[in-house]
Image (spheres, helix red, strand yellow):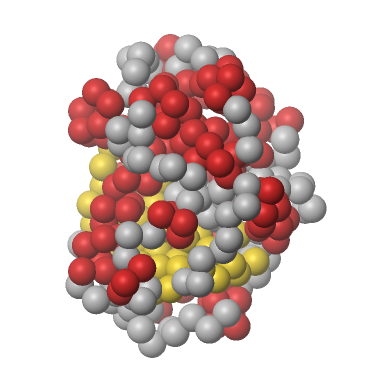
């Protein structure tokens, strides 16, 4: 992404979440704020959703990974975790939908300063107030120390935390990924949910889509740089002290949630969602 511009991929993901509300009635992830924060009408959202024959796969994966993360987060809150960190939050609306308000949890949204300024503007235009439990923490993942920025925002490093890290890992260098996992693992009893992509794990019909996606990312100065084999991800997590690791591949996601998405395109996509506990 360009230094002073919000992330275009964050906009794309927000459109997929909104399209899920319109086309699939929020059956995987019900989000009454998705359309409001996007500031687009249904016609524009449907135009985006129908713009590519395989757009339904993106709609399924975007909402399913959030659902998996939010279900795991709810279980963590039941176990007593009170700090939630959303790394690369984009236009995520969990803090607005927070079902744990009575538990006195704090939600830290960590993202690029330009993306956060853009989000604040969207919320203001939609007349949506920032909830009291939400703290926005501006961070450039490639340059800044996430831990320093969080501590400056009153994050308690000696208390357990739940981290969601969705739609970020494929765009980071392996150094930045390692530094972030170093930090997460430094928090005792921490948990993280993130997604990653396998190297070239595409059927022939999806290979062309991936080529087009890469070309689109180049045009908007985004890049997809880090890909992993499942065994490689497990080894990295174990090396950082994570024990319980659940790795959910796209076939499992399609069988668990696929019925909820209209017109789901067939095909194998090498994307995974991981839930790991330290």
Task: Examine the image and state in which quarter residue 241 appears.
Answer: bottom left
Q: Is residue 32 visible?
A: yes
The residue sitting at 43% across, 73% down in the picture is: 106
Q: Position of residue 208 (x, y in %)?
A: 52, 15
The residue sitting at 55% across, 24% down in the picture is: 42
Q: Is residue 109 left or right of residue 221?
A: left
**Quadrant of image for the C terminus:** bottom left
Q: Position of residue 237 (x, y in %)?
A: 33, 61
Residue sitting nearer the eye, 57 or 135: 135
Task: Examine the image and state in which quarter residue 37 appears.
Answer: top right
Q: Is residue 131 left or right of residue 214?
A: left
The residue sitting at 66% across, 25% down in the picture is: 215
Residue sitting nearer the eye, 79 or 269: 79
Q: Is residue 37 left or right of residue 186?
A: right
Q: Residue furthest bottom?
A: 158
Q: Position of residue 140 (x, y in %)?
A: 66, 62
Please determine whether, in this image, residue 81 is positioned above or below residue 58: below
Task: Examine the image and state in which quarter residue 181 appears.
Answer: bottom left
Residue sitting nearer the eye, 169 or 14: 14
Please determine whether, in this image, residue 70 is positioned above or below residue 185: above
Tally the numbered discs.
Answer: 0
The residue sitting at 30% across, 33% down in the picture is: 27
Q: Is residue 239 visible?
A: no
Q: Position of residue 56 (x, y in %)?
A: 42, 22
């Amino acid at each position: 992404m360009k230094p002073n511009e919000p992330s275009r991929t964050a906009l794309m993901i927000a459109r997929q979440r909104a399209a899920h509300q319109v086309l699939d009635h929020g059956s995987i992830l019900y989000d009454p704020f998705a359309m409001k924060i996007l500031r687009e009408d249904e016609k524009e959202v449907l135009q985006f959703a129908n713009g590519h024959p395989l757009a339904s796969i993106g709609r399924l994966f975007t909402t399913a990974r959030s659902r998996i993360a939010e279900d795991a987060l709810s279980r963590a809150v039941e176990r007593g975790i009170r700090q939630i960190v959303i790394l690369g939050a984009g236009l995520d609306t969990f803090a607005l939908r927070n079902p744990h308000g009575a538990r006195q949890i704090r939600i830290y949204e960590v993202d690029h300063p330009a993306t956060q300024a853009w989000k604040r503007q969207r919320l203001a235009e939609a007349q949506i107030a920032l909830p009291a439990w939400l703290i926005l923490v501006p961070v450039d993942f490639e340059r800044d120390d996430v831990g320093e920025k969080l501590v400056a925002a009153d994050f308690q490093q000696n208390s357990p935390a739940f981290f969601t890290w969705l739609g970020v890992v494929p765009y980071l260098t392996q150094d930045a990924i390692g530094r972030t996992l170093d930090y997460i693992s430094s928090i005792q009893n921490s948990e993280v949910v993130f997604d990653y992509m396998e190297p070239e794990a595409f059927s022939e019909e999806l290979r062309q889509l991936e080529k087009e996606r890469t070309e689109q990312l180049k045009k908007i100065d985004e890049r997809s740089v880090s890909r992993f084999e499942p065994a490689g991800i497990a080894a990295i997590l174990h090396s950082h002290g994570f024990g319980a690791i659940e790795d959910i591949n796209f076939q499992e996601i399609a069988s668990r949630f696929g019925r909820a998405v209209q017109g789901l395109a067939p095909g194998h996509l090498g994307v995974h969602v991981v839930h790991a506990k330290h």
